[in-house]
Amino acid sequence: MKYLVLIPEALVGATAVIVLMAGRLSWSSPAARRSLPAVVALVTLVALGIELWAGATLGSYFEGGLVQDRFALFAKAAVLLAAAIAFAVVDWTAEDSLTISLAMPLIATFGVMVAASAGDLVALWAGLELAAAAGVVMVALRRPDLALRLLVTGGVASAMLLTGLAFLYASAGTSSLATMRAVLFSGAPTLALAIPVFLVISGLAVRAALGPFQLASIPASVGASPLGAGLVLGLVAAAAATVAIKLVAALTPIPSVYSTYLEVIAALAMVGGGVAALAAQSPRARLAYLAAGQIGWVAAGLATHYRSGLAGSLFLLGAFAVAATCGPAVMGGAEGGEQALAGMGAQRPARYIQSPPDEARRTTKLPVLSGLSSFGAVAFCVVIAAYGILSSPILGLADQGAEALGLR
């Protein structure tokens, strides 16, 4: 029973490999390719069901490298739900490659799951980098120039993150998050700790497109396909936020080395993201800046260094992962100004609500309407509504997740 907890990760990772091999070796027929998105969405839902059923079994694996606790259960369930809805709702005619567009979100989901279960610094870094690499691949399908920019910026972020993590390991004498937290209770905040923490948070801010660090993520999301934009804005940012929550939980004995910095960048992200969204003319760009602003609220919760604050961050992260990943997919290939979306309320009622204009003014086609996409759009709306209606019990689960990280 204990090792059933690892089945969701194995299922997601194996499905990604099989989909890539099927596309490369032309294993599937045209009819099978048409049904592939539905099959992958179903597999992701099965992984979610197994996670909810077996994930309550707490334990550690690989000598503490991976830990299954309430935090991991909450984060992994949120990202699996986001991926399943995205696969269902996306307009596949607007994607550049069916198999790669299915495999890369699965790999990014696997990366977030690894980060959520990470028991040490190595697993945290590995999960984040895996998700980020999948985002670069998705952007490269349509805009290699933006993908190269994202890769270079991500390399800088990874270098800052690795340098900071190396200094934290040297200071605490351990890579285990739980042991690090216990060691730091007997330590004192010093400049030698503040500098590596500054580097770690800066690297995570770049990965999460946290304003004003959205150097490459926002342009890449605007130029990518709808699902690619959701991967960069949603899954990669969720991976970075997951790493940030686990690191802050380990650093709570010395809040003075990170609280002020988090407060400043959270305020900049919230205000800057909102202002930029108001100024944006394109729906895709507006959604990207809104996502950059919303992740600032997650950072604001981390700045409190209390259990209730981290629980609030985890609660917001669940909603953010679903909305930011699926939002671009709902819009499909709609580009340009507001008129690109106008009319979806009449012709695509399951996807959007807005008054129809004269069709002669339309500059882009509306997303293709299918049974799967309609079901996905309805499921997306239901999940977002349910998250608000059931906010109290969900926040209680998030509080259990914060408690699992050792917070009181």
Image (tube, rainbow, N blue to C red):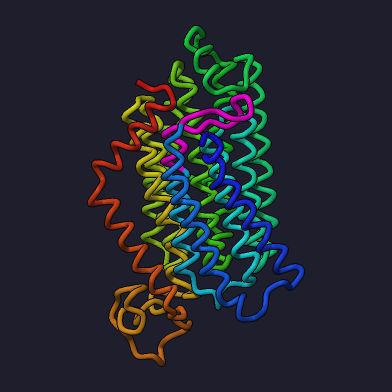
Looking at this view, name the residue that lies furthest to the top.
186
Q: Pinpoint residue 141: horizontal percent, then vertical percent.
A: 67, 66
Q: Pinpoint residue 66: horizontal percent, then vertical percent.
A: 58, 32
> In this image, 338 relative to 115: left or right?
left
Looking at this view, name the residue that lies furthest to the front.
1
Q: Nearer the viewer, residue 61 or 140?
A: 61
Looking at this view, name the residue that lies furthest to the right.
25
Quarter holding the C terminus is top left
> In this image, 30 relative to 348: left or right?
right
Q: Nearer the viewer, residue 349 or 386?
A: 386
Q: Is residue 339 above or below residue 287?
A: below
Q: Pinpoint residue 273: horizontal percent, then vertical percent.
A: 41, 51
Q: Within the magenta stretch, is there residue 370?
A: no
Question: Can residue 68 be seen?
Answer: yes
Looking at this view, name the residue that lies furthest to the bottom.
360
Q: Nearer the viewer, residue 299 or 104?
A: 104
Specify the quadrant of the image occupied by residue 104. bottom right
Which residue is at 45% across, 37% downward?
A: 265
Q: How many marks?
A: 0
Q: Is residue 146 above or below residue 96?
A: above
Specify the quadrant of the image occupied by residue 394. top left
Residues in magenta? Answer: 58-75
Q: Is residue 285 above or below residue 303?
A: below
Which residue is at 29% across, 39% downward?
A: 395
> In this image, 18 relative to 398: left or right?
right
Question: Can residue 211 be seen?
Answer: no
Q: Is residue 1 above or below residue 207?
A: above
Which residue is at 55% across, 50% downward?
A: 109
